[in-house]
């Protein structure tokens, strides 16, 4: 009787390996959908982990994500490539994700998880502007109008219905969080690595964030529920989602996956409302819809021919 090793059984259960039979576009879409679903848990889990200090939350979450990613690499027999990830790539990913996520964690308690999520998810609109500048492309009136619509959506979302009251600095932090990820995504679009680079970067992320915690934040005792939420952050929206997205950006189907990513704020708001974790007003929901419409129009996805690999 044929024997089956534990490693081969585990390998069959990994989502990335399970995508091999799919075609290129279907694989890109599946990777992007997985990233969106995992990203959508971020505001809910961050709310459950609060009021823990942001650097502590992110440092512990990154440590959990690193251990989980290393374990998966070991079970797949890819430990050597895991530890051989170029340090330049690790540093770029670590700094990009650290700044992006910590800014969001600072913004969330000031303006509310729903509002912070919507403002931060202006990043697809900002990414369009950055990529156009990078490639020296001219944006037509319809795309420029869509970009303006996205920012109008943010204004609607951060209007007088703030869950925690109007806080200009909190809005600024959330906006910077989105801008940081847009810049990071633009730089990573040039990446050509065949293997996962997110997992190896979690180790440096943990070191940097915990060093900042011990240097600038007061020590605090965490409850069991906060620790569980932080562990979930490390595995789901931090490691798995970014690993899926990073893989998706290197498929060449940039327009397709960007269109899918625009659903993230709506998915996140739906989860917040479903679980009753945060207040989701009609203004926030309307703002999120405007941002999605604006981002879709700005990307030009609606006018592209299916199968096109142009970003």
Image: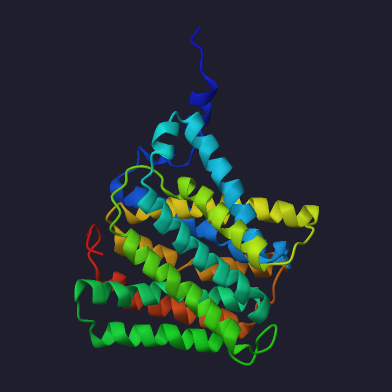
Residue 246 in view, yes or no: yes
Q: 90 or 291, which is in the foreground?
A: 90
Q: Quadrant of the C terminus?
A: bottom left
Residue 32 in view, yes or no: no
Give the vertical position of 193 relative to 100 (above or below): above
Instruction: Tell me if 280 is positioned left or right of 250 in this view.
Output: right
What residue lies at 39% left-to-right and 65% top-to-bottom?
184
Give the image quarter of residue 128: bottom left
Give the vertical position of 69 relative to 122 (above or below): above
Specify the farthest residue to the front. Answer: 215
Q: 4 or 236, which is in the foreground?
A: 236
Instruction: Tell me if 292 is positioned left or right of 220 in this view.
Output: left
User: Total label count?
Assistant: 0
Give coordinates of residue 126: x percent, y percent. 38, 77
Q: 55 or 285, which is in the foreground?
A: 55
What residue lies at 25% left-to-right and 88% top-to-bottom?
141
């Amino acid at each position: 009787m044929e024997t089956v090793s534990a490693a081969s059984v585990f390998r069959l259960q990994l989502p990335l390996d399970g995508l091999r039979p799919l075609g290129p576009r279907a694989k890109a879409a599946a990777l992007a959908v997985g990233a969106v679903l995992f990203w959508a848990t971020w505001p809910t889990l961050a709310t459950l982990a609060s009021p823990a200090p942001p650097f502590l939350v992110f440092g512990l979450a990154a440590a959990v994500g690193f251990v989980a990613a290393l374990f998966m690499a070991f079970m797949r027999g890819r430990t050597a490539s895991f530890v051989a990830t170029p340090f330049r790539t690790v540093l770029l990913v670590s700094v990009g994700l650290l700044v992006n996520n910590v800014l969001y964690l600072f913004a969330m308690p000031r303006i509310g998880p729903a509002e912070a999520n919507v403002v931060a998810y202006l990043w697809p609109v900002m990414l369009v502007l950055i990529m156009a500048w990078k490639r020296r492309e001219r944006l037509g009136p319809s795309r420029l109008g869509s970009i303006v619509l996205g920012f109008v959506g943010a204004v609607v979302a951060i209007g007088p219905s703030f869950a925690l009251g109007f806080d200009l600095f909190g809005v600024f932090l959330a906006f910077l969080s989105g801008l940081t990820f847009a810049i990071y995504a633009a730089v990573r679009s040039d990446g050509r690595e065949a293997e996962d680079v997110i997992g190896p970067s979690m180790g440096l992320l943990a070191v940097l964030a915990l060093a900042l915690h011990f240097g600038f934040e007061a020590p605090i005792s965490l409850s069991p529920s906060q620790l569980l939420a932080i562990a979930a952050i490390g595995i789901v929206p931090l490691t798995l989602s970014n690993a899926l997205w990073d893989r998706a950006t290197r498929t060449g189907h940039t327009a397709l996956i960007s269109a899918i990513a625009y659903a993230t704020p709506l998915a996140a708001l739906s989860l917040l409302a479903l679980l009753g974790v945060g207040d989701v007003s009609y203004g926030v929901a309307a703002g999120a819809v405007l941002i999605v419409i604006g981002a879709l129009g700005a990307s030009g996805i609606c006018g592209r021919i299916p199968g096109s690999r142009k970003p």
